[in-house]
Image: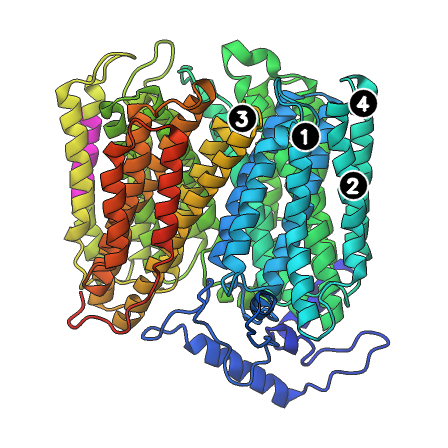
Amino acid sequence: MRRLRTRRWVRGVVGRPVVTGPSMADAGKAPLPGRPASPAGPSTVRRTNAAVDDLHARRLPGRTRRGFGDPAWRPPAGWQSGRVAMSASAAGRIRAAVSGRIQPGPGGVTRLELFLDLVFVYAFINVTALMSANFHPVGLFEGFLVVALLWRCWASYAWFGNTVRFDRGVMPLVVFGAAAGIFVVAVTLPVAFADRPGGRWDPLVFAVAFVLVRLVPLVVTTLAGLNAGDRPLFTRRAWLPLCVTSPLLLVAASLPALLPDRPPVRLAQVVLFTVATAVDYAGLAGLGSRDWRLGSVGHWAERHSLIVLVALGETIISIGTSRGLVGDPPITWSVLGGSALGVVVVIMLWWTYFDLARFAAEQSLRRLPGGATSLVGRDAYALLHLPMVGGLILLALGLKHALSATEVSTAGRWGTGSVLALYGGALLYLLGLLAFEKRGFDLVGRSVALGIGLLLAATPVALNTPALGSLGILAACLGTAVIADRTVFARRHRRLHEAVAGTVRRVTAVRPHQLFLDLIVVYAFIQITVLVTRQPSPAGLAQGLGVLALLWWSWCMYAWLESVAPRVSTLVRATVLAAGALTFVLGVAIPQAFSRVPGGLPGPLIVVACYVALRALHLAALFRVARGDPVLRAQAARAAVPTAAALALLVGATLTFPPLGRPIPPVTAVCWTAAVVVDLAGGYLTSARDQGIRSIGQWPHRYNLVVLVALGEGFISTGVALADTSISAASLVTVALIVTLLAALWWTYVGTDRVLDRRLSQVSTGPRGAALARDVYTYLHLLTVAGLILVALGLTTALAQAAQRPGAPLASLGHAALHGGVLVFLAADQLIWRRATGRFCRRRMLGLLVVALAAPATAALPSLASLMLLAAVGVAVATTTSLPAVAPPGGP
């Protein structure tokens, strides 16, 4: 019977034309009970496919690349977008941003939505910190309440982005303001239920910021709908839950300041938070298709898949930060083994979602009529993804305790609660995934059900097993469930994969396994900042930049591997996931990359061994992909020569590293410098004549996201520095200035990327396009990322010093890192502009000169004054985003 259901589902997917866009959701579909049949027939489907082909033709080489938030995109002729005409009033400008979100395919997530998700990354990380600090049943329940509120907030912005174009009119300002509010929520999240010493109204700041952030989507969409003279996008029923939730949260947040800190007061807070959360979700579940509509199925599915990846990345970061960001604990075999097992667990959970369920649910959702699409999309994504994300956060807490238990000083943290958090998080994730599969495409995943059964059977055994043993059992259970899809359930799994092949091929943006590697790079970037912070000197800064250069080059090689591969095979995906595991282990040892800590394994040897394995794995996969392609094989052979020389120099450098606290010998410094230069310079041995890039659209996407990842480190570093600071007016102003600075840097990069995008579309994928992509992305983007990491280092130093000595001038290293980071970022922006257009942008050059001249002049000023100046210059530079009318003659 189950096999018959599978066949019916597969025939339903394959036998019907896949139509994109909400205006064509009913084409060729059977009507719902009680609804008239859709008038769409074969001619409508042909017109739909013609419109899709017309849109895809815009992305071919030689045309301007569209999508990914490009405001120059326009729907093709005949496409009904329902966009409202622009008016002169502010309400009209907001209304002009409203659209039906008609973007076929899953590539509709804009850059500003990704920027917003960066702030949510830190919020989810802080939930883990909140639970870890209050590791008891009541504390865990409070953490789940906060997770539910955060998820409801994120889901409202996901729907907001599905309805409103974030990159039109005044919407960028609205989004950046919302990002500042979300960051305040994230910073004050640890004090949502209790004040810090000296901060009487901290919970109220959290509640007010949360309510204001929740109001933004409702206000903008309601205002736009009312001024359009059409039916409002949100009816009164959409406002009622928030009207009840907001007073409850504000009253609960006011209790610690008005009443003494006693258990009944804390219980009243928890009850009010619980009622508010229940009302909020009841209001969402009570909305019908007339109140809650989806504009684009592809956008909705991709947005949720990205946030699942974000939660997985948060799990990786929690594993890494379990050893702390201060001190130098020794690296032992148990630490490396536990870290490797933790990464295996995360990879297995990643596979259960992104191997099939992510694409099958999207494809099934596209086949439903309009009203059913909205309701199933709400249930499967906005509601049933909550237990998945909550399970990953609980799993991150368990992994953090498991890795801490491998240290001698914190071995006592491993107990029954830690085991239940570890296994309970995995079980909650799999239960949510099982419900998502049932609601999304009406099938029950056999491997997921098998994994749930194995975990339930293994939990009693894990309760009496040490931390490493429990991690090993968990990894074995999840691995068995994943392998079962390829063995026991192979026939069913293969049929389902064939059914969703069309949806998988339409994913032309960055693929999930690629972004998974990028998220692991976030942790490595954080560890580079830790390395420099532990040795605050020019030598420490040089060491951090050297590790960054090698890490960047390794990442670039894997990005290039996938750009030349004819298809995304299992070999390529497995190679990238293995590279992610090696990158994580390398990141664990980065703080000890240039010293030996007594009692542990040599950090320099671990870093070099992981880097050698990364480069060897890349070359092996490249030669495998190049079978039958003599040009690519010759290119791989040429690339292997400088790689071998650089690896030999690094291995030689590991023989002369000093103990902790001793200066590095000149021979070691020379070997490291020579290895970095040889490895990076070896890229030019690959001729632009042979360097082919199969996807001109995917290549920029990868580098856009890694820059966004580096920008996210600024948020994480800032949040960590503010973790123990009481909330005050000065701290809120500092948060606003930091968000303004980071948003201005991001918007500056977006403007330059549009210029580069236009130039790449003109030179296509030939030798000139390959040379331009190599120079701009592989080399000049290294300066961009280095600038952002220096900014994160400067912000961390500035905030830590401001907490200890308010109003004092910034220390020399922090001042140099902050101003130098902005200077390097703007210089890289100018070099990219020059390489793409043949000239510099004069107005942006003025901002670069202002930062260069202000750096020595502001050395004696308080840190807040330096932040104000840099934020003002950043905003001025970001607003100069005019595009050149024509490309320069001759080109690159």
**Side of 871 where 371 appears, left or right:** right
Residue 723: which disc? 3
Residue at image mark 4: 265
Residue at image mark 1: 203
Does residue 794 sit above or below 883 in this rendering? above
- Which of the image's four quarters has the N terminus? bottom right
Secondary element type, mark 3: loop
Does residue 445 sit above or below 720 in this rendering? below
Q: Residues within 10 Å of mark 1 (few under 14, many from 20)?
A: many
Q: Mark 4 to mark 3: distance in Å?
A: 24 Å
> Residue 441 in magenta?
no
Q: Mark 4 to mark 1: distance in Å?
A: 13 Å
Q: Which of pointers 2 and 3 lies earlier in the amino acid sequence? A: 2
Q: Nearer the viewer, residue 75 or 681?
A: 75
> Residue 650 in magenta?
yes
Q: Amino acid at mark 4?
A: Val
Discs 2, 3 touching: Cβ within 8 Å: no
Secondary element type, mark 4: helix
Q: Nearer the viewer, mark 1 or mark 3?
A: 1
- Scheme of image coloration: rainbow
Q: Give the percent coordinates (x, y) of residue 73.
A: 46, 72
Q: Give the percent coordinates (x, y) of residue 549.
A: 26, 38
Q: Amino acid at mark 1?
A: Pro
Q: Nearer the viewer, mark 2 or mark 4?
A: 2
Q: Which of pointers 2 and 4 lies earlier in the amino acid sequence? A: 2
